[in-house]
Image (tube, rainbow, N blue to C red):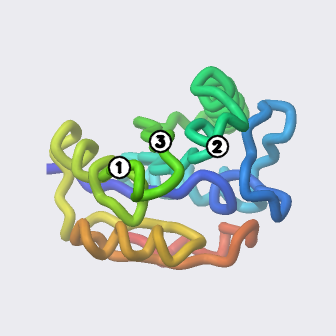
Amino acid sequence: MNKAVFLDRDGVINNDYDNYYVYRPEDIMLNPGIPELLADLKQKGFLLIVISNQGGISKGIYSHDDVEKTNGRIEQLLASYQIKLDEIYYCPHYSLSEKCICRKPGTLMIEKAISRFRIDKNTSYFIGDRDTDMEAGKSSGLKTIKVKANQDMSSLINMIS
Protein backbone atom coordinates (compact mmCIF):
# COMPACT_ATOMS: atom_id res chain seq x y z
CA MET A 1 0.00 0.00 0.00
CA ASN A 2 1.11 3.54 -0.76
CA LYS A 3 0.68 6.75 1.15
CA ALA A 4 -0.43 9.94 -0.58
CA VAL A 5 -1.08 13.60 -0.09
CA PHE A 6 -4.07 14.85 -2.03
CA LEU A 7 -3.91 18.57 -2.78
CA ASP A 8 -6.42 21.08 -4.00
CA ARG A 9 -4.99 23.10 -6.89
CA ASP A 10 -6.14 26.75 -6.85
CA GLY A 11 -5.25 28.45 -3.58
CA VAL A 12 -3.03 25.58 -2.39
CA ILE A 13 -0.55 24.81 -5.18
CA ASN A 14 -0.98 28.01 -7.15
CA ASN A 15 -2.09 31.49 -6.22
CA ASP A 16 -5.68 32.10 -7.21
CA TYR A 17 -5.47 35.92 -6.96
CA ASP A 18 -8.80 35.95 -5.12
CA ASN A 19 -10.36 34.80 -8.42
CA TYR A 20 -12.66 31.83 -8.47
CA TYR A 21 -11.30 30.61 -11.83
CA VAL A 22 -7.66 30.27 -12.81
CA TYR A 23 -7.42 28.84 -16.31
CA ARG A 24 -4.68 30.61 -18.27
CA PRO A 25 -1.17 29.13 -18.08
CA GLU A 26 0.37 32.61 -18.00
CA ASP A 27 -1.53 33.36 -14.77
CA ILE A 28 0.00 30.45 -12.86
CA MET A 29 2.22 31.41 -9.96
CA LEU A 30 3.17 28.78 -7.40
CA ASN A 31 2.33 29.64 -3.83
CA PRO A 32 5.27 30.39 -1.54
CA GLY A 33 6.72 27.25 0.03
CA ILE A 34 4.86 24.81 -2.22
CA PRO A 35 8.03 23.51 -3.97
CA GLU A 36 9.70 22.93 -0.61
CA LEU A 37 6.63 21.21 0.84
CA LEU A 38 6.15 18.95 -2.17
CA ALA A 39 9.86 18.05 -2.26
CA ASP A 40 9.70 17.16 1.44
CA LEU A 41 6.61 15.00 0.91
CA LYS A 42 8.20 13.19 -2.04
CA GLN A 43 11.33 12.56 0.02
CA LYS A 44 9.08 10.99 2.70
CA GLY A 45 7.61 8.65 0.09
CA PHE A 46 4.21 10.26 -0.47
CA LEU A 47 2.44 10.21 -3.81
CA LEU A 48 1.26 13.69 -4.82
CA ILE A 49 -2.22 13.79 -6.31
CA VAL A 50 -4.14 16.93 -7.25
CA ILE A 51 -7.94 16.93 -6.83
CA SER A 52 -9.56 20.03 -8.33
CA ASN A 53 -13.02 21.34 -9.16
CA GLN A 54 -12.97 23.10 -12.53
CA GLY A 55 -16.60 24.14 -12.89
CA GLY A 56 -15.76 26.91 -15.33
CA ILE A 57 -15.77 24.23 -18.02
CA SER A 58 -19.45 23.48 -17.43
CA LYS A 59 -20.23 27.20 -17.31
CA GLY A 60 -18.50 27.77 -20.67
CA ILE A 61 -15.88 30.11 -19.21
CA TYR A 62 -12.98 27.90 -20.33
CA SER A 63 -12.35 24.51 -21.89
CA HIS A 64 -10.82 21.15 -20.99
CA ASP A 65 -7.88 22.20 -23.18
CA ASP A 66 -7.42 25.36 -21.07
CA VAL A 67 -7.32 23.22 -17.91
CA GLU A 68 -4.84 20.78 -19.47
CA LYS A 69 -2.55 23.62 -20.56
CA THR A 70 -2.79 25.27 -17.14
CA ASN A 71 -2.05 21.97 -15.39
CA GLY A 72 0.86 21.52 -17.79
CA ARG A 73 2.24 24.89 -16.74
CA ILE A 74 2.02 23.86 -13.07
CA GLU A 75 3.85 20.63 -13.86
CA GLN A 76 6.49 22.55 -15.81
CA LEU A 77 7.11 24.95 -12.91
CA LEU A 78 7.31 22.07 -10.42
CA ALA A 79 9.69 20.15 -12.71
CA SER A 80 12.15 23.05 -12.42
CA TYR A 81 12.37 21.99 -8.74
CA GLN A 82 12.64 18.29 -9.73
CA ILE A 83 9.09 17.62 -8.47
CA LYS A 84 6.67 15.43 -10.38
CA LEU A 85 3.01 15.14 -9.52
CA ASP A 86 1.73 11.58 -9.69
CA GLU A 87 -1.67 12.55 -11.10
CA ILE A 88 -4.08 15.43 -11.56
CA TYR A 89 -7.81 14.75 -11.40
CA TYR A 90 -10.37 17.46 -12.07
CA CYS A 91 -14.14 17.69 -12.19
CA PRO A 92 -15.55 19.80 -15.07
CA HIS A 93 -19.00 20.19 -13.53
CA TYR A 94 -20.30 23.27 -11.80
CA SER A 95 -22.86 22.00 -9.35
CA LEU A 96 -24.20 18.86 -7.82
CA SER A 97 -27.47 19.61 -9.62
CA GLU A 98 -25.74 18.34 -12.78
CA LYS A 99 -25.97 14.90 -11.15
CA CYS A 100 -22.24 14.96 -10.64
CA ILE A 101 -20.60 12.64 -8.14
CA CYS A 102 -17.04 13.77 -8.81
CA ARG A 103 -17.20 17.43 -7.78
CA LYS A 104 -15.87 18.03 -4.27
CA PRO A 105 -17.24 17.48 -1.67
CA GLY A 106 -18.00 14.32 -3.68
CA THR A 107 -15.30 11.70 -3.38
CA LEU A 108 -15.16 10.00 -6.79
CA MET A 109 -11.84 11.56 -7.85
CA ILE A 110 -10.25 10.54 -4.55
CA GLU A 111 -11.75 7.05 -4.75
CA LYS A 112 -10.33 6.60 -8.27
CA ALA A 113 -6.86 7.56 -7.08
CA ILE A 114 -7.06 5.33 -4.00
CA SER A 115 -7.95 2.37 -6.19
CA ARG A 116 -5.51 3.09 -9.02
CA PHE A 117 -2.50 3.79 -6.81
CA ARG A 118 -3.37 1.32 -4.01
CA ILE A 119 -3.38 4.08 -1.39
CA ASP A 120 -3.65 3.44 2.34
CA LYS A 121 -6.20 5.97 3.57
CA ASN A 122 -4.91 5.69 7.15
CA THR A 123 -1.51 7.13 6.20
CA SER A 124 -2.75 9.71 3.69
CA TYR A 125 -3.81 13.36 3.82
CA PHE A 126 -5.88 15.96 2.00
CA ILE A 127 -4.64 19.57 1.99
CA GLY A 128 -7.19 22.16 0.92
CA ASP A 129 -8.33 25.72 1.47
CA ARG A 130 -12.11 25.24 1.38
CA ASP A 131 -14.67 23.41 3.48
CA THR A 132 -15.55 21.26 0.44
CA ASP A 133 -11.93 20.01 0.40
CA MET A 134 -12.13 19.08 4.07
CA GLU A 135 -15.47 17.34 3.60
CA ALA A 136 -14.18 15.33 0.62
CA GLY A 137 -11.05 14.32 2.51
CA LYS A 138 -12.89 13.31 5.67
CA SER A 139 -15.57 11.42 3.73
CA SER A 140 -12.76 9.49 2.02
CA GLY A 141 -11.16 8.54 5.33
CA LEU A 142 -8.15 10.84 4.95
CA LYS A 143 -6.54 13.10 7.52
CA THR A 144 -7.27 16.69 6.53
CA ILE A 145 -5.31 19.91 6.78
CA LYS A 146 -7.08 23.18 6.04
CA VAL A 147 -4.90 26.08 4.97
CA LYS A 148 -5.62 29.69 4.14
CA ALA A 149 -5.74 30.32 0.40
CA ASN A 150 -2.36 31.36 -0.99
CA GLN A 151 -0.53 31.04 2.33
CA ASP A 152 3.14 30.11 2.59
CA MET A 153 2.91 26.33 2.44
CA SER A 154 6.37 25.77 3.96
CA SER A 155 4.65 26.03 7.35
CA LEU A 156 3.29 22.52 6.68
CA ILE A 157 6.74 20.94 6.41
CA ASN A 158 7.20 18.48 9.28
CA MET A 159 3.44 18.41 9.98
CA ILE A 160 3.11 15.38 7.74
CA SER A 161 5.16 12.24 8.27
- Residue 106 shows up from this direction: yes
* Left or right: 144 in relation to 114: right
Of mark 2 and mark 1, the one earlier in the sequence is 2
Please state the horizontal and vertical placement of residue 152, each as a whole percent of the image. 74, 70
In the picture, the disc for residue 100 is 1
Name the residue carrying label 3: 90
- Marks 3 and 1, how far apart at CA: 12 Å
Of 158 and 85, which appears nearest the observer?
Answer: 85
Q: Are marks 3 and 2 in contact (CB under 8 Å)?
A: no
Q: Is residue 48 above or below residue 64?
A: below
Secondary structure of the residue carrying numbered label 2? loop
* Left or right: 55 in relation to 106: right
User: Which amino acid lies under the numbered mark 1 shown in the image of this protein?
Assistant: Cys
Closer to the eye: label 3 or 1: 1
- Marks 3 and 2, how far apart at CA: 11 Å
- Residue 80 shows up from this direction: no
Please state the horizontal and vertical placement of residue 150, each as a whole percent of the image. 75, 66
Secondary structure of the residue carrying numbered label 3? strand
Please state the horizontal and vertical placement of residue 66, each as a whole percent of the image. 68, 26
User: Which amino acid lies under the numbered mark 2 shown in the image of this protein?
Assistant: Gly
Residue appearing at x 70%, y 32% in the figure: 62
User: Which amino acid lies under the numbered mark 3 shown in the image of this protein?
Assistant: Tyr
- Marks 2 and 1, how far apart at CA: 14 Å
Quarter of image, res 16 = bottom right
In the picture, the disc for residue 109 is none
In the picture, the disc for residue 56 is 2
**Crowd class of label 3 (few under 14; some 14 to 19; many from 20; radius 10 Å):** many
Q: Are marks 3 and 1 in contact (CB under 8 Å)?
A: no
Residue appearing at x 70%, y 70% in the figure: 149
Secondary structure of the residue carrying numbered label 1? loop
**Crowd class of label 2 (few under 14; some 14 to 19; many from 20; radius 10 Å):** many
